[in-house]
Image (spheres, rainbow, N blue to C red):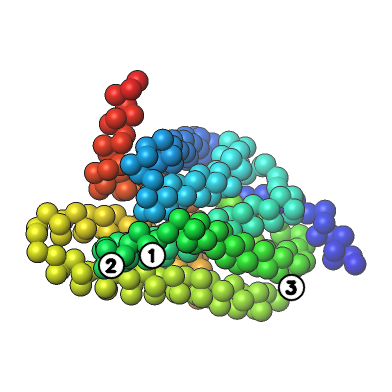
């Protein structure tokens, strides 16, 4: 009971990137610019898909939903991170606040990973079974796949968050990170966390390996189908559509695997914090850029929208 009372009163603080206020302000400006760029880029993609009837097809439906996920995903992290950068790590976050941030971060990140696998399946059907595409990728199925991604993200996040915040936290209340990430928070617990680390590793492995395996299998068939396309223009069009998705997958899964699948003995808080910047701030910026630069339909829709102003 005493441990529970101690834990309930604890407020967490985030370890600053530097003790130099000028460096902190510089990082604050960089984070703010990245956050605003991510918001504007992903909002642009979502709005373009919504207002252009020519983009009302499954591929762009999933892309628009990915953009919306990225908006909420970064917004679960950025405001508190920015506040802590300005206050030199003196902005407190309560146990419930930290748990809420962790839940939404894992929920949205998990849904993001599953959605990338869904998008790979969509490209597989479009390229390998073009004549049956509209029948297979019906709108009811697309909605079910999107809802399924959210449900899986929720089912991943809720038990992990509850498991971690049932741990007792004592005197050490400084999180060596810029948000409530699971490995960083578990390091503060004043109890044996081996079971929790094992559970986190197993669930992370399943959540990352199964969608990544499905993506890999889809692209084996996709590449085989692309090589059979006779026209060079057709091959280039198909490859351009798929390569943008592959780049996003490599960034998202590569960084996430580094954090959650590395052995706990080799976990470096400093390196974990740096890598986390990539998939919390940089990847959400690159997603709309990669898709828009390598996608003719999206670029044309953007030009038409700009001409109206």
Q: Are marks 2 and 1 in contact (CB under 8 Å)?
A: yes
Residue in view at x 78 percent, y 54 percent: 10
Q: Residue 90: give x, y in percent of width and height.
A: 66, 42
The answer to whether residue 206 is left or right of residue 217 is right
- The residue under the point 41% across, 35% down is 51
Q: CA distance from mark 1 to mark 3?
A: 51 Å
The label on residue 191 is 3
Locate the N terminus and report the quarter of the image it occupies: bottom right
Label 2 – label 3 distance at C-alpha: 54 Å
Task: Mark 2: give few (<14), some (14-19) or many (20+) Cα within 10 Å.
Answer: few
Nearest the viewer among 267 and 293 is 293
Identify the residue shown where x is 27% and y is 59%: 242
- Closest to the camera, between mark 1 and mark 3, is 1
Mark 1 nearby-residue class (10 Å; few <14, some 14–19, many ≥20): some
Tag 1 residue? 136
Mark 2 vs mark 3: which is more N-terminal?
A: 2
As drawn, 288 above or below 128: above
Q: Which type of secondary structure does the marked residue at label 3 adopt?
A: loop
Q: Find disc 2 in the rendering and name its residue.
A: 129
Closer to viewer: mark 2 or mark 3: 2
């Amino acid at each position: 009971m005493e441990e529970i009372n101690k834990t309930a009163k604890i407020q967490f603080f985030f370890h600053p990137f530097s003790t130099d206020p000028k460096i902190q302000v510089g990082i604050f400006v960089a984070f703010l610019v990245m956050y605003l760029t991510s918001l504007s880029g992903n909002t642009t993609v979502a709005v373009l898909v919504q207002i252009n009837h020519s983009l009302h097809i499954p591929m762009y439906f999933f892309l628009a939903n990915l953009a919306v996920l990225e908006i909420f995903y970064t917004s679960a992290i950025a405001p508190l991170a920015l506040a802590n950068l300005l206050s030199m790590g003196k902005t407190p976050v309560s146990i419930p606040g930290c748990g809420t941030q962790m839940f939404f971060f894992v929920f949205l990140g998990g849904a993001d990973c599953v959605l990338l696998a869904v998008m790979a399946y969509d490209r597989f059907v479009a390229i390998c079974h073009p004549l049956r595409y509209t029948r297979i990728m019906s709108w009811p199925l697309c909605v079910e796949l999107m809802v399924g991604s959210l449900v899986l993200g929720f089912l991943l996040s809720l038990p992990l968050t509850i498991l971690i915040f049932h741990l007792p936290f004592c005197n050490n209340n400084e999180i060596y990170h810029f948000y409530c990430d699971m490995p960083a928070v578990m390091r503060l617990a004043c109890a044996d966390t081996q079971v929790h680390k094992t559970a986190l590793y197993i669930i992370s492995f399943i959540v990352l390996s199964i969608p990544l395996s499905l993506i890999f299998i889809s692209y084996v068939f996709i590449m085989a189908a692309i090589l059979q396309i006779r026209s060079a223009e057709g091959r280039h069009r198909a490859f351009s559509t798929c390569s943008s998705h592959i780049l996003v997958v490599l960034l998202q899964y590569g960084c996430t695997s580094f954090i959650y699948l590395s052995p706990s003995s080799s976990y470096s808080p400093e390196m974990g914090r740096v890598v986390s910047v990539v998939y919390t701030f940089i990847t959400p910026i690159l997603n709309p850029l990669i898709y828009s630069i390598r996608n003719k339909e999206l670029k044309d829709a953007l030009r038409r929208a700009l001409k109206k102003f």
